[in-house]
Amino acid sequence: MPRKGIDKFVVVRDKEIATHLVPGVFPAGRQAEWSAQNRTVTFTVHPLTNGVAMAVAGKEPRERLAKDIRVYEQDQRVYVCSMVPVPDERLPFINDTHAVFTSLQNIMDASSQDNEAVGIDGLLRMSALYREAMLRQVRVLQDARVVSEFISGEIDVFQSMHAVWHLLEIIYLSTNMPGLSTSVVPFYMEWLNFNFPSPLAEDGQSIIDGGGDADSLAKNADLWPYLQKLALRGHVTTLANMLERVAPSQELSAAASRWARELAKTSREMPLGSDEETAGSFNARWRQWNSELQNMATAVGSLLDVSGTQSDDAALSSLYTIVDIMRGDADAGSAAGETWQDVLGAILLYSEPTAQADRLPGLAHIVLEQFQTGDSTLLDRALVALLNHDLPEFLVYCNQIDSWLSAHLADMMEHINILEICRRVFAVDPREHYLLALGELYLTHENLWRVSMDYFGLCRTAAGTAVMEEYIVRMPLESDRKAQQVLRVCDLYGLKNARERIHRQLGRQKWQRGRLGAAIGHFAHVNDRNSISQICDQLWAEYLDSGKLTYGPIIDGVMAAGLKHDRLQFLTQYRDFHESYKTGEYASAGKLLLSILLNESAPAHAVPDLLIDTIPLLEGDKLVFSSDDTFELMRCAESLVQSPFATAAKPSANSAADKGNVGRDELSIFNVACARNLARSFVMQ
């Protein structure tokens, strides 16, 4: 493709917003005047919802304009409105195809690691799952109680999506099996009759219901057009049945009756290829069958020319048209076909029954010259681009049909190894772009955030990871369950920085709500020792205020998770000290208290309170502390007196240090108790 054509395929992320604003952005009926006065509309889309803020803006800065600009009342307003979100009717389809998409990526990743190709068979199975989901969605929509304009539009979209996907599957997968030379004709005819059903079964039944006997059939004006459609679509068995039914009619001429029977017999003998038959054998049978049709066309044509009954014997003339179609006459097929798909099918079926997929562009070009391109639909343009192997333009048209289609087709094309040509044409990587765009679209629905994250993450590109990280750290965390889901996504895609930010955010939230154990757990995941220390100080301060050790369950839950922190260890040991003291296990209590002081696991502001807690044990009836233990206690007291903590300015009234501040009287009592215990220990030892 020439370089100058690149701009045609540059992907631009246009956000289309459907708004119904009252009052409007411009005065009613004065849009042209409003626009001429340097007016336009600007908007900002909320990054995580479908909310939109709209306002009036100038096309050019006012300083550049010589004339005065009229001011409208609407210029001062900001409109907060909504984009049309993903409809709820699509949720089952989105979830089903999301499961197929993730499974396909996992399969491809596993195959690359094992050095085993998935193969066309595997891709065909995954493609079939996508098509089943589309057809299931069509059936659901068709079964809706009220078929609104929206539902009808959705049905058209999904039918178009299926037609496009099915044809791509035929061209690049079904007829591309390794080691086989597969004709595209049966696959194309199956695609044509499935996605563009004509003639309908109801049409034939309606003709029969109008009168099942031969004479009634012959009189029915819809019969012969219907038989021509059967011939175009290759329904030769149904065609033979209808011809045999009408042949005995007295309304037909003798010639028409005879040739109706002959055509019915020849139709039933149409050769059908099989895997067991060689191409040479099939071609020989086909030439024989086509020769019979050529002879039949000559005979019927001579009857029309000799008798001059072409205008009178409509049945014989219609039979001649059907024979012409079936012997591969392109002009007859074009005249009878209503769409280019019909004509292409007739040419393939009756002229080139062994044609392969690479023959489609040439035949499509011949057929499309006979149809006005101005009347083509978006679906037509996408199908033609696919037949011509113009994959960049094909993706652009698919994106206009539906963003789901372009994203998943780009992904499938990547796995088929045909996307590289698009990368040479697009300004961005098409797979990455369409997957990111689809993920952003799904973020407008609150129930699809998890699906969006997978589309971002499975781009397998730096841009996809960056976009996912930007979105996920701003994800509203309404519940613990959602928070855990968000964290699992971070773990799944290796978003270390996002994971740390979310843990800190959750830790602050739990802290503010008084769920200190959960807060400690979140801070521990990011090794935020400072925040954990502050929470432990808060627990200590609450103990000093109330005199009750209520933090036991919190600490037990955190320690059970294997978290190690000096402040947590201090609180745990201090709780154990109290329990031992209450049960009268003074020796055990004394060892725990001395261990806390010697290991220096306690914060400096808690040391005075710990020393005071030793007084009952020092003055007890039983000797708890030995002389060496007493000397260690005295050393701790001496260090406390000489420490900056003892000489620093008095802390704030709300701090744990202030609440645990011990006066000189308490220290004097502690010193006396130590002296007595020391003397007693010397005597007893």
Image (cartoon, rainbow, N blue to C red):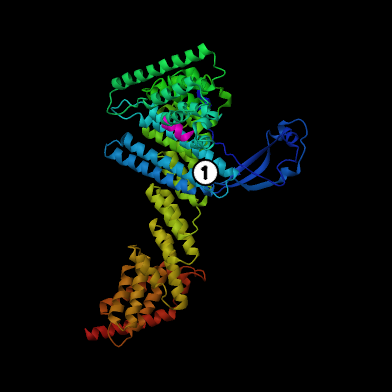
Picture quarter containing residue 549? Answer: bottom left
Q: Quadrant of the C terminus?
A: bottom left
Image position, residue 495 (x, y; %):
40, 48
Residue positioned most to the front: 250
| Frontmost residue, 447 versus 243 | 243
* Most common SS among magenta residues: helix
Q: Is residue 404 magenta?
A: no
Residue 10, visible in the rendered structure: no
* Vertical relation: 655 (above or below) 324: below
Picture quarter containing residue 271? Answer: top left
Q: Residue at x 33, y 39 (%)?
A: 108
Residue positioned most to the bottom: 621
The residue where tag 1 is placed is: 441
Stretch in magenta:
189-197
Residue 149, visible in the rendered structure: yes
- Mark 1 Cα-neighbour bin, 10 Å: few <14, some 14–19, many ≥20: many
Image position, residue 483 (x, y; %):
45, 56
Image position, residue 378 (x, y; %):
54, 31
| Frontmost residue, 139 versus 423 | 139
| Frontmost residue, 585 versus 659 | 585
User: What SS does tag 1 mark?
Assistant: helix
Image position, residue 364 (x, y; %):
46, 22
Residue positioned most to the left: 685
| Frontmost residue, 189 versus 335 | 335
Q: Residue at x 45, y 50 (%)?
A: 450
Left or right relative to 161: residue 146: right
Amino acid type of the residue tagged 1 in the rendering: Leu
Picture quarter containing residue 296? Answer: top left
